[in-house]
Image (cartoon, rainbow, N blue to C red):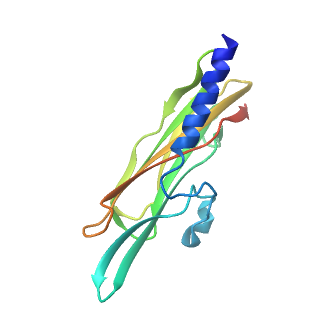
Amino acid sequence: MRIHARRMAAMMIAAISVLTMAPGVSQAAHPAPAAADKGNVAGAPFVFTRKTGLGVTQVINCWGRVDHPHNSTGTPSAVTGKSQTWCDAPIAQISAQTELYRYLDGYGYTLVGIGSLAYELNHAGPVVSTAYDICQGRLAYWAAVGRHRLVAPPGFQPPSITLTTGTPGVGVNC
């Protein structure tokens, strides 16, 4: 049974790792030039473009990230995972939602918390979603997944982008 649990944990971590990669995005973290205070960003910016004529192209850069699970500073006896989505100009719709997974012996990483869907219309963000779980009173392992959706303003391409970011399993002692 232990071998099966380890194999399942390895498969879940591999799946989360694959989910963090989107086509054309490097795995290295790049801080956003206009948003360096937001911490490490998952991948290069996602870009919406619009041709305006005479060879001029308008560009909107957007980013998404998820923080490593950690002891909550605002909710005692809780572990939190937080995801954020933001752009350098307003877009039609911007959203973020966080999922928190805890490693359970015999089951692997299991969904234990879902943050509220944070969204804004005609906004640049940031929008923030936080998922919570109860502390175990001992060392336990959590992973966080951020789901980000970006809808372009009229005339921009692509029409929308869906991005998933994730963390590896992180030990939290609380």
Query: How far across and down, in percent of the image, does residue 42 sit?
Result: 57, 55
Corner quadrant of residue 140: top right
Identify the residue shown where x is 63% and y is 15%.
106
Which quarter of the rendering shows the C terminus?
top right
- Picture layout, residue 28 above or below residue 102: below
Identify the residue shown where x is 63% and y is 16%.
4
Identify the residue shown where x is 36% and y is 63%.
123
Q: Camera-side residue: 124 or 158?
A: 158
Residue that protrudes farthest toward the front in the picture: 24
Corner quadrant of residue 127: bottom left
Number of disc labels:
0
Which quarter of the rendering shows the N terminus?
top right
Please indicate whether residue 133 sits to the left or right of residue 140 in the image.
left
Can residue 172 be spotted in the picture?
A: yes
Q: Camera-side residue: 106 or 25?
A: 25
Query: How far across and down, in percent of the image, does residue 11 sit?
Result: 59, 29
- Picture layout, residue 6 above or below residue 163: above
- Picture layout, residue 147 above or below residue 86: above
Query: How far across and down, in percent of the image, does residue 66 sit?
Result: 56, 48
Query: How far across and down, in percent of the image, does residue 25 sit?
Result: 53, 57
Residue that protrudes farthest toward the top in the picture: 1
